[in-house]
Image (cartoon, grey):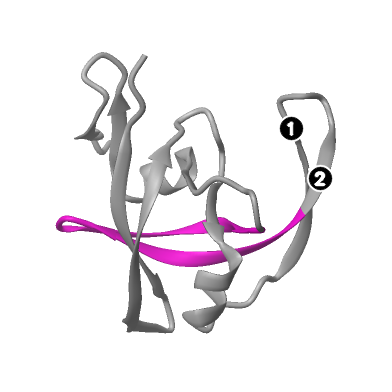
Amino acid sequence: MDLTNVKITICNPNDPQHEESHEFLVDSGAIYSVVPGTLLKRLGLKPYADEEFHLADGTTTVRKKGYAMFKYLDRIGVADVVFGERGDASLLGAFTLEALGLALDPLKRQLRPLPMVL
């Protein structure tokens, strides 16, 4: 099975001109996006909570959680993010995909617009 990687721009919602692009593995099975903590700190973002996460191997770990603005093509959204640490993969999770109005097409492995329903 192929993996889907995309380049996304991350911004500080309080200063959207302060932005940086980064490559992510799209993981629609992950709830939160994992962004390198060093990148988030460069953008002036600060965590607001510590969160415990269960890993695939059955262990748990604690990471800091905050929020960031994401830009992809003509789409903009704000979502919670995990402040990644050394060794963590950069993941684009379900909350961020939904905030951008996107979904992963599992057959073509491409991001597609999500039908927006009120």
Q: Position of residue 103 (x, y in %)?
A: 31, 32
Q: Label 1's element?
A: loop
Q: Secondary structure at mark 2?
A: strand
The amino acid at mark 1 is Leu
Report x, y in % for residue 13. 42, 76
**In the rendered view, would you say 14 is above or below 71?**
below
- Where does the N terminus fall, quadrant-wise? top left
Query: Do residues under tags 2 and 1 come within 8 Å of each other at their CB atoms?
Result: yes
In this figure, which residue is indicated by the disc labeled 1? 55
Q: Which residue is mark 2?
A: 61
Q: Position of residue 66 (x, y in %)?
A: 61, 65
- Quadrant in which residue 15 is drawn: bottom left
**Which residue is drawn at the image coordinates 60% and 66% (left, top)?**
37
Q: Quadrant of residue 53?
A: top right
Q: Residue at x 78, y 60 (%)?
A: 50
- Judged from this view, the residue extending furthest toward the front is 87
Q: Depth check: 101 or 29 in front?
A: 29
Note whether residue 54 is visible: yes
Graded by Cα atoms within 10 Å as few (under 14), some (14 to 19) or many (20 or more), the crowding at tag 1 reads few
The residue type indicated by label 2 comes to Thr
Q: Is residue 55 magenta?
A: no
**Front residue of this view, candidates 87 and 39:** 87
Residue extending farthest to the left is 74
Would you identify the image quadrant in which residue 30 lies?
Answer: top right
- Image coords of residue 57 (percent x, y): 77, 24
Q: Which residues are magenta?
A: 63-85
Q: Is residue 68 left or right of residue 104?
A: right
Q: Is residue 82 magenta?
A: yes
C-alpha gap between disc 2 and disc 1: 7 Å
